[in-house]
Amino acid sequence: MFLDRFWANTINGLAYGSIYALIAIGYTLVYGVLQLINFAHSEIFVIGVFGVYFTFLALGFQPGAAPNLPIGGIIADLLLAGVVGMVLAGAAAVVLERVAYRPLRRRNAPRLAFLITAIGASFVVQQLFRIFRGSNPEGTIRLLQPEPVFRVFDAPVTNLQIIIVLASIAMFFAADGFVNRTRLGRGVRAVAQDPATATLMGVNRERVIVITFLLGGVLAGAAALFYLMTIPQGAVFNGGFLLGIKAFAAAVLGGIGNLRGALLGGLILGVVENYGQSLFGGDWRDVVAFVLLVGVLMFRPTGILGESLGKARV
Amino acid sequence: MVRRRLAAAGALVAAAALVLSGCANQGGGGAAQTSQAPAPAQPNNAALPAGNGQGKCAPGTSIAYVGTLAGQNAALGQAIANATELAVNQHNQANPGCQVTLVKSDSGGTPDTAVGPTQAVINNPAVLGIVGLPFSGESKAVGPALNAAGLVNITPSATNPSLTTNGWTNFFRGLGNDAVQGPAAAKWIKTKFNPQSVCVIKDDSDYGIGLATAVTQALGPAAACQGNVKTNQKEFSATVGQVQQANPQVIFYAGYYNEASPLVQQLRDAGVQTTFVAPDGVKDPEFVKNAAGAANGAYLTCPCVPQEGFTAFTQAYQQAYGTPPQTYSAEAYDATTILLSGIDKGINSRPALLNYVKTYNGQGLTKKFAWQPNGELTDTPVYVYRVDGQNIVTDSPI
């Protein structure tokens, strides 16, 4: 059973893990710069999901079976929806930072206060969606019907999975390159390493923080598109909760504060929980995921790659 | 492009084959033919909320709907709340001497959210009886408090069998439980498909677990594979893989529409065309909407009675809420009628209304209501429905 499904599980796990990874980057970046666990990040993701969904609606798609569109049209529509999701999620992250965190930072609030506002902001956004859109998932709109393209050891790889994995890795490298190779990215790393000195050296700390939130939000928006393509029933007010926890676990697993750790953690978590549910049954999925997390943290308390956004070696 | 065309052509052929085989199935059994329009008409002697128009009661007398309105699987709760409201409105219109207030309380639909709203209703002395709670898990959680308060509680939809084994004296079930539905569903699956193997997949709710146990037992050795999913799960690749391996003739899913829609869609995406059978928790238009095309052809068992035949009720509901009544609307309408008929007779206390329901014996729209001492009905019809395109249509009685 397990061996028969090994490759299928691996492929599904990589595709789903890519979504974890993209969300995890948002947790990791904010943690690296502010040492803050942004629990509202899962709601930023949900805003992205609804952004993508409403773009589908605005483009004239209706809930139902996948329409038969030319491939070019599908790509254009998906790109547009993705861009809207990314812009909305990015903007929401910046607004969140301004409303929920900046006033506290101004007053030098203790770290615990940030944690509480993060959870509070998360509930506010979640319940707003529930009030305005109800608690039933939005009707399924699917642009791209998953179809196997080729097989790896008899396990089908669908067009959807290829798109998700490739696009996620591309976005990861873009984010990694931004943080490691650009001037702004150097500012981000400088603030992560030593905020006081960085400020003395002329780095605008507030701007760096806004950029960090923006980048995390944009990646969450991209994850939202991929998620909604995989799970068309995903546009629902509490859709970000479990995914957010998993992505946070992925970030910790890889080493929170570490971009590459987020990618690695997301992929490992996605794959291992698929193995787990194949071995022990579907209800063991989350158990396996978190036992893995605990196990890794016992031997490597800072995660697989360590906390290193601010360290010189990143 | 070529690949896509080929795939599309393949899908067409497959669809055509499905349609043909579907026709063959229907043509095969004479019984299936005769049961194409099995929806019962409104019984002549059915009690209606309007009563005789002579009701007298104190101003402010209230009954309550407690159940999900905006929480988990809310559509199921809204169908019940609307029917309850409709019954109260019709009653108040017909009985100028008795204006009953309906208190609607959102339980959130889960055991941990239901306790607070239920307590609020218990603390409201004007409330003499409750229609609800819709779900088994939440009913179990609030049962002791309601029983202690002696507040009569008719559920129009909670079907977990264990609910009537707690010694609660105030709990009445307005429909057949899963110990009725499960074996009925299993019997129907056996006669219709005569399968060698059935995959029984359940969620982690009281309802899903109880129903899956009943179905598995009744299927016997044919229940060859068992799968588990979790509430709010949306990604089912492991379950899909399990089904692909077991290659059953029928899948029975014991759970709610929230998980059933993505599950059936992911099964169909993976090329699993096995017949999908699910219970009353899935029988909602939300299932069809959220599964997109994948729900087509699914069978849904339900201890609910088809409502098409109750034309006066369905028209009034349609007029008031803009949709036809949904699953358990008629059952909720009946339950409300029973409470209102007691109030009309001058009952003005919780113990008196409780006693009235306990000894009630009368025909409703959906069935005859007369409870056994444990709160179960004796008359418990089960029906099979079918997803046909965008609609859920009545297939046959079991």
Image: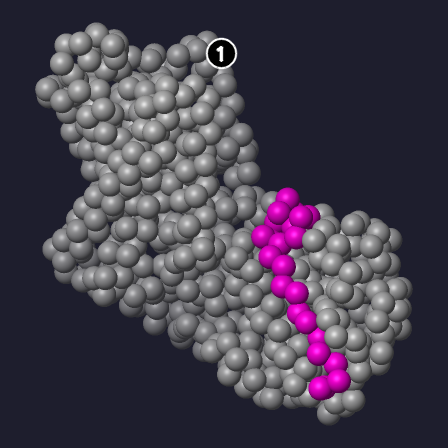
Residue B92 picture location, percent across and down: 68, 82
Which residue does the numbered mark 1 point to in the structure image? A298
Residue A247: image x %, image y %? 38, 31
User: Can you say which quadrant of the picture contains the C terminus of chain B?
Assistant: bottom right
Q: Residue at x 82, y 76 (%)?
A: B342
Residue B391 picture location, percent across and down: 45, 74
Callout 1 environment at 10 Å: few (<14), some (14 to 19), or many (20+)?
few
Q: Which residues are magenta?
A: B95-117
Closest to the observer: A265 or B212? A265
Extreme residue in the front direction: A107
State how many labels appear: 1
Indicate yes or no whether the magenta region holds residue A290.
no
In this rendering, does residue A49 appear at all? yes
Q: Nearer the viewer, residue B343 or A148?
A: B343
Q: Secondary structure at mark 1?
A: helix
Q: Is residue B197 visible?
A: no
Q: Using the rendered view, name the quadrant where residue B186 is placed.
A: bottom right
- Whether residue A86 sits left or right of residue B119 in the image: it is left
Q: Name the residue rendered at 80%, 69% in the picture.
A: B377
Of the 4 image quadrants, the one containing the N terminus of chain B is: bottom left
Location of residue B157 in the rendering, given as x and y in whole percent from the top left corner = 67, 64
Reply above or below: A159 against B391: above
